[in-house]
Image (cartoon, rainbow, N blue to C red):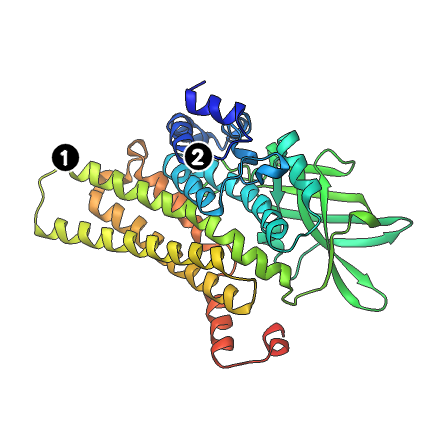
Amino acid sequence: MMMSELQATTTMQQKDIDWLSLAESLGEQFAVRDTEADETDVFVADNIARLKTTGLVAAGVPIELGGGGASYTEMCAVLRVLGRYCSSTALAFAMHTHQVMVPTWRWHNQKAPVDGLLKRIATEQLVLLSSGGSDWLQSNGTAIKVDGGFLITARKVFASGAPAANLLMTSAVYQDPELGSTVLHFAVPMQAQGVVIESTWQAMGMRGTGSHDVILSDVFIPDAAIALRREQGKWHPIFHLISMVAFPLVYSVYVGVAEAARDRAIQLTMKRSTDDHLCYLVGGLDNELTAAKLALQHMIAIAEVSQPSFETTNQIMTGRTLVAKAVLNVADLAMEVAGGSAFYRKLGLEKLFRDAQGVRYHPLREGEQRRLSGQLALNWTIDHINS
């Protein structure tokens, strides 16, 4: 174990851990396994295990609750660094990280009673699994009322990091006899009876994320475990908080991927003679990468100083669209700059191109984002926006 990793393991109660140096050290190790995961669709289990033993899984948990006390900005930077070395590890870790940073924000800003979960993450090194991206406002699955709780039946897709997870943070729809379609939010232990991972993840890119389907079959959730109830399909304050906290973290990964694609393209180009047109392409490549970085910085800055609201969500989601566009342009231009050699898998750029495509699919996608931005600009009422 390298010294920076040993420090993180043995001094979690200190505030002076250099999380970025640790991420760089781990990233260099993860890069060795990156190609294997891509070629075989194998989950990056060993990498996630290293994130646990080095303290990064609990880095965002406040010091007072036993965690590493890393700031929000630091966690964004860690994910960006990891994204440069192993896209799949970074994206799977981002899905855990945002589930840590949301209750951390609530603990700091709302004095919410989430200390029990955060302490467990720190002491047990729990890995959290999110189904939020595929559920979003509508959710899916059914919750049937029984004595003392609910029976949950659902299929949760794109559950990145599923093979290593301890708790699934998810939701299902209950047909409340008085309130109608109501979304219930709760955590499900992955070892609970009725929980099965179905190995469905054979994808274009991000192949090592283990983003399999999680099947819930009559899983019992006690009444006391229901953390939130909300009207189906309607914006709720928790989704403004999730939007604010989660998406700068997730999109930090993709900016890291874009940085890696740019650097690889330049490496390959240095081996050929250059001309004015190639210089023009490289200049355009750097323009797009700068645009991605600036949009990401905007998202992070908003998340650091804002309160959850429609306006904050609008700012975050606008940034998300701009980052996505720029990252995809970087991937395209990197292939163009490198020329025909980029088509060979062994040179690594083709993989980065594929991994970058995932930036398209996280909510809100551009059409929905533009619709929300337009509604707010035209002063639509909240009820109108929700409809």
The residue lying furthest to the top in this view is 1
Q: Which mark is residue 271?
A: 1
**Residue 250 relative to residue 219: left or right:** left
Task: Tell me the residue that label 2 is attached to.
Answer: 19
Q: Quadrant of the N terminus?
A: top left
Instruction: Name the side, left or right, on which 236 lies relative to 305.
Output: right
Disc 2 is placed on an element classified as helix
Residue 340 in view (yes/no): yes
- Taking 53 as reference, is 161 above or below it? below
What's under tag 1, amino acid-wise?
Lys
Would residue 188 appear left or right of 382 to someone viewing this image? right
Return the x and y of residue 296 as percentages of the image width and height: 39, 54
Q: Is residue 159 above or below residue 17?
A: below
Question: Mark 1 or mark 2: which comes first in sequence?
Answer: 2
Q: Decide if residue 205 is in sight here.
A: no
The structure residue drawn at horizontal position 38% and vertical position 54%, both measured from the top left corner, is 297
